[in-house]
Image: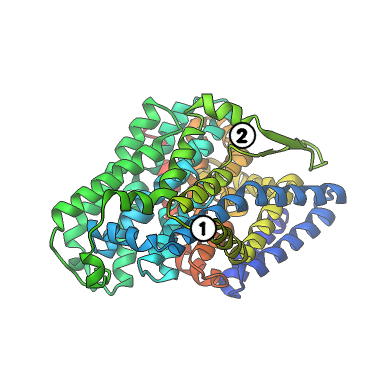
Amino acid sequence: MFIHFLLAMLPIIWLIIALSGLKMAGHVACPIALIITVIEALFLWKQKIIDVLTGGLEGFAMAIWPICLVIVAAVFTYNLVVHTKNMELIKKMLTSVSKDKRILVLIISWGFGGFMEGMAGFGTAVAIPAGILCGLGFDPIFAAMVCLVANTTPVAFGSIGIPTVTAANVTGFSPHMTASYVVLQLAIMVILVPFFLVFITGKHEGAKGLGDYKEILFITLMSGVSFLIPQYLTAKFIGAELPAVIGSVCSMAVTIILAKVMLKGKSSKFDVEIEEDESEESLTVKDALVAWSPFILVLVFLLITSTLVPAIHDPLSAIKSSVPIYTGEGAAPYTFTWVATPGVLILIAAFIGGIIQKCPIGEIFGVLGKTIVQMLKTIITIMAVLATAKIMGYSGMTQSIADFIVHVTGSFYPLVAPLIGSIGTFVTGSSTSSSVLFSKLQASTGAELNINQIWLVAANTVGSTAGKIISPQSIAVATAATATVGKESEILTKVIKYFVLFAVIYGLVCYFGLRLI
């Protein structure tokens, strides 16, 4: 059984070694992982060649539509705002709240990133905030790193709660109860992540010790608390769709108010550098709305076409095509949703926003073309990762990994239940896919061990948020947004310790939390 487990882990082991040890670029390492997976599926898991090929083809389809589509659209939106020079106005507005880089990281990567995750998901919460941080003058590798660490706990309720809703639907458990348990297990990290972001920023800017942070520790604490409390109340009394959206909005509001009150007129060595003539220019409400118009339209379009507005969502969602791709056991047609998908909506919003910003339509298409060229290596990476994930899932390799972990841990299984969820996200790049893969396994293991099944299903979703930190797909998005493609190994090396910390804390919370609920 151990040999079976080790062989199933081989593509994952290769990715870790290639990206961290060999410092290989993602668009090179991931296709090799796909080749390894194909060979194993054919010769060790004895899958038919047609099933392997069509499984990989389904992965390619999913990678292109909707994942690469939404990531290209998000980066295009940012690039367009830079092209029209409106990023300078956004920069001025953000720094009018605070010039302190630590506060800006909290507002942009934690608050705004959490909002983008809650609304759209699919990498937008890394792509757009990381791009904005680069626009403010932050180091690109640093911007990628903090956005990956920030884009963790909100992932459980990304894209209007899809990962948690999916976990509940797959197992037949109450979405409200599942969502409540997810927030309870996330609680410690929701408080800690803002501190991680602040300390990462301080260290990067040369902080000497705790004394360099004392003036913002309370703001940092409240940035987490103001996210957690609304998130829990929303999950418990409203459902799994809006916890990340409402929590992030409250967190941004509290962080901005406290920064304006507590840091007003104060300067520090952590301040971003702004040229004096820029800071003295007046800025009207109209200027602000025009500058933010692509992002405002993105949020409006995503909101009015979500399940929260069924009168719009339902007819748009009906515009779809179901195409049989995978030919093996358990095959189901793959559905292309043509309009009510974040990528299309973000593209439409960006074009309208560009026109509002008086950018000629030819230039808008030019920016889109340059963005696609910029993203080509990232697209290769994501296509290879999704094809690998599909083949591993259909052949039984992913299940073999989970079964072995369940077998060897016994009564201590709750310690590693979140780890299984994180493996699902590492392989697929999606918390939702992790829910589909392993929620039933978590529930059946809970029944076998006579422990709370919903708690373990929630632990899978919670663990999946940690896997986002080191997922090759997430890192590919981060490198594309920060123009650091080819430096995936450097980013992985910097963030992997946070993944380990998340996995350990989530495991302890799951294990000891069972005795408290």
Q: Residue 29, image x and y in percent?
A: 66, 68
The type of residue carrying mark 1 is Pro
- Where on the picture, by quarter, is residue 197? bottom left
Residue 59 in the figure: left or right of residue 144: right
Q: Could you tell which of marks 2 and 1 lies nearer the N-terminus?
A: 1
Residue at left 64%, top 64%?
376
Residue 212 in the figure: left or right of residue 416: left
Q: Which residue is mark 2?
A: 440
Of the pair 433 and 158, the residue shown nearer to us? 158
Of the pair 469 and 374, the residue shown nearer to us? 374
Regarding mark 1 in the picture, which secondary structure is present there? loop
**Quarter that holds the C terminus:** top left
Q: How many marks?
A: 2
Q: Residue 270, image x and y in percent?
A: 24, 69
- Residue 211 visible in the shown view: yes
Query: Between tags 2 and 1, which lies in front?
Result: 1
Answer few, some or many: residues within 10 Å of disc 2's Cα (few below 14, many 20 plus, some between 14 and 19): some
Of the pair 499 and 97, the residue shown nearer to us? 97
Colour mode of the rendering:
rainbow
In the picture, the disc for residue 459 is none
Position of residue 304 relative to residue 282, above or below, is above
The type of residue carrying mark 2 is Lys
Position of residue 252 relative to residue 360, above or below, is above
- Residue 48 visible in the shown view: no
Q: Residue 170, image x and y in percent?
A: 60, 31
Residue 302 in the figure: left or right of residue 150: right
Q: CA distance from mark 2 to mark 1?
A: 52 Å
Answer few, some or many: residues within 10 Å of disc 1's Cα (few below 14, many 20 plus, some between 14 and 19): few
- Where on the picture, by quarter, is residue 72? bottom right
In the picture, the disc for residue 360 is 1
Regarding mark 2 in the picture, which secondary structure is present there? helix
